[in-house]
Image: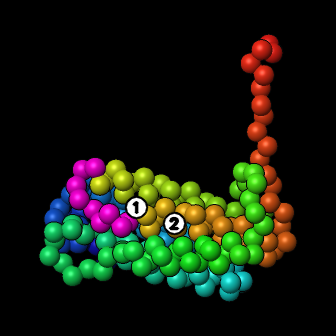
Amino acid sequence: MYTRTGDKGETSLYGKRRVPKDSPRVEAYGAIDELNSLLGVIASHTKDKSISSPVREIQRMLFVAGADAATDLDSGQDVPRIGGSETLRLEKMTDDLLGHLPRLRNFIIPGGSQTAAYLQLARAVCRRAERRVLTASREEPVNPDLLPFLNRLSSYLFNLSREANRRSRKKEVTWVGIIRDSRRRS
């Protein structure tokens, strides 16, 4: 399907308002869509239901987040919005994971199993979506619940990556920073 309505670099938000395709709002919901697509790749590649099931649940939440970001707050459109309940759900999901993960004492270099590496990539894309929503919110009103939701989601994806490594018996590679003595010359 094609409409040709975007051929000159504009698109419609939900509710008909036309904006440039590179507007901060479009960048925000585009990053959310990119994250959702990446999670679809992850869910389709893992056979572990303890990973794919919550990823699919998050994808459903992200459809709401994307629609929310694509709709002006005053549009008059009856669109579902992200609220505190989704953020609380992510907190509970994270707490459940932390119940069987070892305490983190160092930074982790992304990697390990393929699923864990993809989940770390998803975490980074989620952080970008969070930044894009923040940028959009500086130009026009967006749902203030989107930022805490995306912030908790990135934390959840980080811990789900750790869980994927634990379940596949892959050791996490920790990062040990190099401390340089400023008095020493090279």
Residue beneath the point at 49% across and 71% down: 36
Quadrant placement of the C terminus: top right
Would you say residue 70 is visible in this rendering?
A: yes
Q: Position of residue 135 (x, y in %)?
A: 34, 50
What is the three-letter code of the residue carrying label 2? Arg
- Where is residue 166? Give x, y as percent: 79, 71
Q: Position of residue 70 (x, y in %)?
A: 29, 67
Q: Secondary structure at mark 2?
A: helix
- The local crowd at label 2, few if under 14, some if 14 to 19, many if 20 or more residues have their Cα within 10 Å, is many
Q: Which residue is mark 2?
A: 152
Q: Earlier in the sequence, mark 1 or mark 2?
A: 1
Type of the residue with mark 1: Leu
Q: Which residue is mark 1?
A: 147
Residue 46 percent coordinates (x, y): 69, 79
Mark 1 to mark 2 CA distance (whole Å): 9 Å
Q: Nearer the viewer, residue 148 or 81?
A: 148
Read off the magenta span: 138-146
**In this rendering, does residue 55 appear at all?**
no
* Residue 141 lies within the magenta run: yes
